[in-house]
Amino acid sequence: MPQWTLAVVWQNLFNSNAVTGTSNGLLASLFGIRMPIWWCQGLFPSVMVLGLHYAAFACILIGAIFRNMDANLEEAATILDTPRYKTMLRITLPMVKPAILSTVLLVFGSAMGSYPVPHYLKFTTLSTKYVSMNSKYTGEASILAIIMMVFGVAIMLLNEISLRSRKSYTTVTGKSGQISKLSLGSGGKYAIALFLVVLTFFTSVFPIISFAFETFLPNPGDYSFLYTGNIANLTTKWWTISENVTESGMYGQKGMLYNATIWRAFGGTLWVSVCCALIAGTVGTMIGYAVSKNRRNRFANYVNSVAFLPYLMPSIAVGVAYFVLFSTDRINLFNTYTVLIVVGTVKYIPFASRSALNSMLQLSGEIEEAAVIQNVPWLKRMTKIIIPIQKSSIISGYLLPFMTCLRELSLFMLLCTQGFILSTTLDYFDEMGLYAFSSGINLILIITILVCNTLVNKITGASLDKGIGG
């Protein structure tokens, strides 16, 4: 889901007129509960929203590793009566160390450059400062971008130093893997299941319900009518009005089902996302494969670091750089799909390269060496051996750039006009005060992502919920 999804849901739940000066949210409207300002705005909600958002991202990156990992070492520790915590600390975690470090790096870089969540929740960060200063104080804004990059590069260097050690991280070999199940006890499995159900509901199911409900409210964001129980006030005008009207807060816009701007932006978003996913996924997979085969080589580490560098840069800074580069008299690609595809590809290559590197590091060299002895060409080794073994990880490496590009705002907001793609169209309607339209676009994005993930899962057996990496 888009980053700002949970931020908007947080506002709809906890805001109140008495505390935040906005319309009453659900808790204030139904139960008269008014949360304090530190709960509604600032550091705490920003940390909670970003943490919940990236928790799923971390699960995606590490999930496939645990799924493919041979349990023989853990079973050997169990036979020797090794305590579970010691098995986790001394055996399991070291084997998945590359993916954990890569996850820390990716999440840190993403959180450092996050703009929508702090913007919605009124929390000042380097990213929000960068946006506010960029138009008036270009030099100072560039310094802020460099500071954000320095933090990311420092984490990347720590990751490279760790992976340069002589420890082996192979977890998929020529031997058959076994599944080792852990007993959680009679009460533990129900407690964990209940926690996960509640967490999933409020981070995944409730946002969809909330955005759908917003599109039927006469005044989006205002839930005060729920207190009186007057459901008759719900309206379908935001969806079904087929003419340009200035009444009822429509500002001359047609309903979403008939709004050409929205559906033109939807088509453009799909085109950019598919192109970025195909190019970034292919290039990233090749980079991950090459680096894993030569990870002791200094040049390979250099290629890996350079390939990952765009992700460490804030999305807004990358957008500004390409705006300056492609908005000149000689080369003017502003407001074209070409510049969006180029920028998106550069920005999302790290997704595919890191996921491919994780999965390739997991493969034992003897698997491919057996084919080399038989003089099997490289292309055939890739298509007949490596890709089938890590199919889930590699295909998911294409999916993640696709899903991310669908909901990207910060990267593209300076490279095209509002209404060109869905994310900038959402921002456009949000500025106009048509919050029902922005909620409807959020709903369209979420449904599109779910449908695409389901189709890929049915056709190939791979999906984001099966993890990235290996």
Image: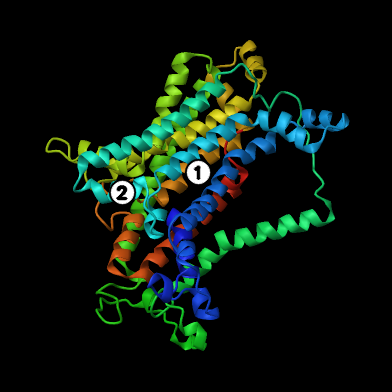
Q: Is residue 65 left or right of residue 203?
A: right
Residue position for label 2: 129
Q: As rendered, which of 9 and 339 lies closer to the eye?
A: 9
SS at mark 1 in the image: helix
Question: Number of callouts in the render?
Answer: 2
Q: Position of residue 362 (x, y in %)?
A: 63, 27
- Indicate whether 305 appears above or below 8: above
Residue 314 quadrant: top left
Most distant residue in the left direction? 329
How far across and down, in percent of the image, does residue 416 sit? Answer: 25, 50
The residue identified by callout 1 is 399
Disc 1 or 2, which lies upstream in sequence? Answer: 2
Q: Is residue 383 above or below residue 50?
A: above
Nearest the eye: 38 or 233 = 38
Say above or below: 72 vs 322: above
Comparing labels 1 and 2, the label whose residue is closer to the camera: 2
Query: In this orientation, which residue lies closer to the viewer: 351 or 14?
Result: 14
Identified at 37% across, 73% down, the residue is 21
User: Can residue 450 be seen in the rendering of this structure?
Assistant: yes
The answer to whether 296 is drawn above or below residue 54 in the figure is above
Q: Nearer the viewer, residue 244 or 321?
A: 321
Type of the residue with mark 1:
Leu
Q: Position of residue 395 (x, y in %)?
A: 54, 39
Q: SS at mark 2?
A: helix
Q: How is the image coloured?
A: rainbow
Residue shown at the point (42%, 81%) measured from the top left = 235
Identify the amino acid type marked 2. Lys
Q: Is residue 346 visible?
A: no
